[in-house]
Amino acid sequence: MVYALVTAGGRGRRFGGPVPKQYADLAGVPVVVRTLRAFDACPAVDRLVLVVPAGDEPWVRQSLIARAGLDKPLGIAAGGVSRQESVFAGLCAIGEEDGLVAIHDAVRPLVTLRCIEACIAAARETGAAIAAVPLRDTLKKTGPGAAAIAATIAREGLWLAQTPQVFRLGLIRAAHEEARRLGLTATDDAALVERRGATVRIVEGSPFNFKITTVADLELAAAVLGRGLPPPGGGRKGEYA
């Protein structure tokens, strides 16, 4: 069994729009719905789990999911105060020990079928795999006060982590449980697995698979969709007016 765990538990305070970024309109479809449709269209995925802010569950199910046109079974879980807590809530909602889970940010709606399938295939072999893109720009480190450059860091071997991040369920659940027990936090799920000594394979992702954090990001995503690249599975049945 392969689960897609889509995290939409944040309130998007940095976004600055009238609604949280995961609910924002992207070319006529809510961001989170576009993301769910990408995983719904993937033959390798069996079930969907969506984590939303606590209290949003009834509205999301009635106002968003009811018109999303999804074919696969979907469960909704209430998130926590941090992304890490929201992922753990989603893992608890899954409950199973075997199989794989593809953890993905709801605000990366331009993820492609090829990327999802490649990450799942890699995780079947190693137990853990993430999408990432190689760093292409020169990296600078500043000194105190960020007024001047203190060092230039070689970009060889440096990657920008994305999602999906796919893991064996037992592996990622154990990593999250250990983090909760020890009071550890990490900016992504792979870091929790890495600290346990597990091998995490990198699958090269796409620059289009960026995270919507600001209104400008949303406008960029709309421009990408307007040019027809990439085809993330957005224009389907149950369209939003």
Image (tube, helix red, strand yellow):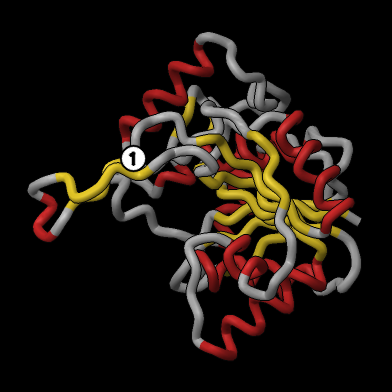
Task: Give the amino acid at mark 1.
Answer: Leu
**Residue found farthest to the bottom:** 181
Give percent across and percent down for residue 99: 89, 61
Of 96 and 61, the residue lying toward us? 96
Q: Nearer the viewer, residue 146 or 98?
A: 146
Position of residue 93 measured from the top left corner of the image (x, y, whole percent) = 73, 71
Residue under pointer 1 = 139
Q: Is 230 on the left or on the right of 152, as rendered?
A: right
Tell whether 108 sits left or right of 49.
left
Q: Secondary structure under badge 1? A: strand
Of the 4 image quadrants, the one containing the N terminus is: bottom right
Q: Is residue 9 left or right of residue 126?
A: left
The answer to whether residue 73 of the structure is visible from this angle is yes
Residue 161's spot in the image, x, y percent? 54, 47
Look at 44% across and 16% down and name the residue there.
223
Asked whether, in this view, residue 146 is left or right of residue 204, the answer is left
**Residue positioned 53% across, 35% down in the render:** 134
- Choose between 226 and 119: the one closer to the eye: 119
Q: Is residue 41 above or below residue 190?
A: above
Residue found 67% across the figure and 54% down from its top: 103
- The residue at the far top in this view is 227
Residue 74 appears anywhere in the view: no
User: Could you classify mark 1 by the number of other residues whose Cα lies within 10 Å: few (under 14), some (14-19), or many (20 or more)?
Assistant: few
Q: How many numbered circles does the render carry?
A: 1
Q: Residue at x 59, y 44 (%)?
A: 64
Q: Position of residue 191 (x, y in %)?
A: 58, 64
